[in-house]
Image (spheres, rainbow, N blue to C red):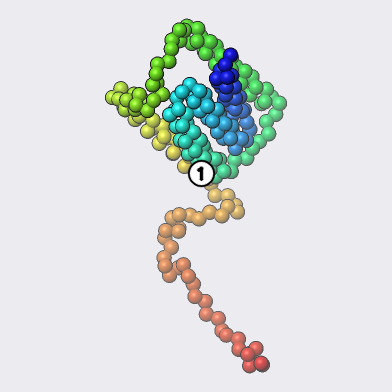
Amino acid sequence: MVVTDILFYTFASLAIIFALVLVLANNPVNSVIAMIFTFIFTAAVWIILQQVYLALLLIVVYVGAVLVMFLFVVFMLDLHVEEQGRVGRFFYALAAVVVCAIFATVISYAATNVFAGAMMQGGVGGLKIIGLTMFSNANLYVFELVDFILLAAMTAAITLTLRAKRKGNKTVDPAQQVKVRAKDRLTMVKMPSNNEGAKDE
């Protein structure tokens, strides 16, 4: 086994481990950090497979932009972490084992039957091939579907930020803020001057 194979299996194993941490973590901040490491190790796997463009796209777009936005959303929502009991942890662990077993079965079947003897063609991850595939007429409806998915995600994020008014919550009603007139913003108060101290001096 050469060094490339060792690095490939190491990065792939770390990506799977951090993906499991992403799913099993109770704290959403830890989940986002685990997702960052998952994308980094996945990008390392792409680099080993000589698909540099896909690796850079994964780092720049997802790690550099999308996951940073996820962190801001998590901090903005102010989620309260609740401790899970032993029963909840057992079901999480059982679900992880089942998912890993299904994943291993699918990969084994694909490696022995579907992709047996198949070789990856050159330029699969190149910018030209990806552009021709993405912007062809056959994938036009896929982009339209992605637009609706992004719209639904944006609507869900806005809905999560809207909370009912709680006692002690320092919020400003936008409707009342718009209705405020210029003369209502500043109130001049006239008070009688006290010059007795100056006269005594």
- Where residue 148 appears, as percent x and y from the top left, is 38, 32
Q: Is residue 178 above or below residue 101?
A: below
Residue 99 on image: x %, y %: 57, 18
For the question of whether residue 99 can be seen, the reply is: no
Residue 102 position, x and y percent, is 55, 14
Taking the spot 57% from the left edge, 19% from the top edge, the residue there is 3
Q: Position of residue 53 (x, y in %)?
A: 43, 29
Looking at the rendered structure, the secondary structure element under dot 1 is helix
**Residue at (43% x, 55% y) in the render:** 175
Outermost residue to the front: 2
Asked whether residue 147 is in view, the answer is: yes
Q: Nearer the viewer, residue 189 or 201?
A: 201
Q: Which residue is mark 1?
A: 161
Quarter of the image that includes the N terminus? top right
**Residue 129 located left or right of residue 190:** left
Residue at the image position 45 percent from the left and 7 percent from the top: 117
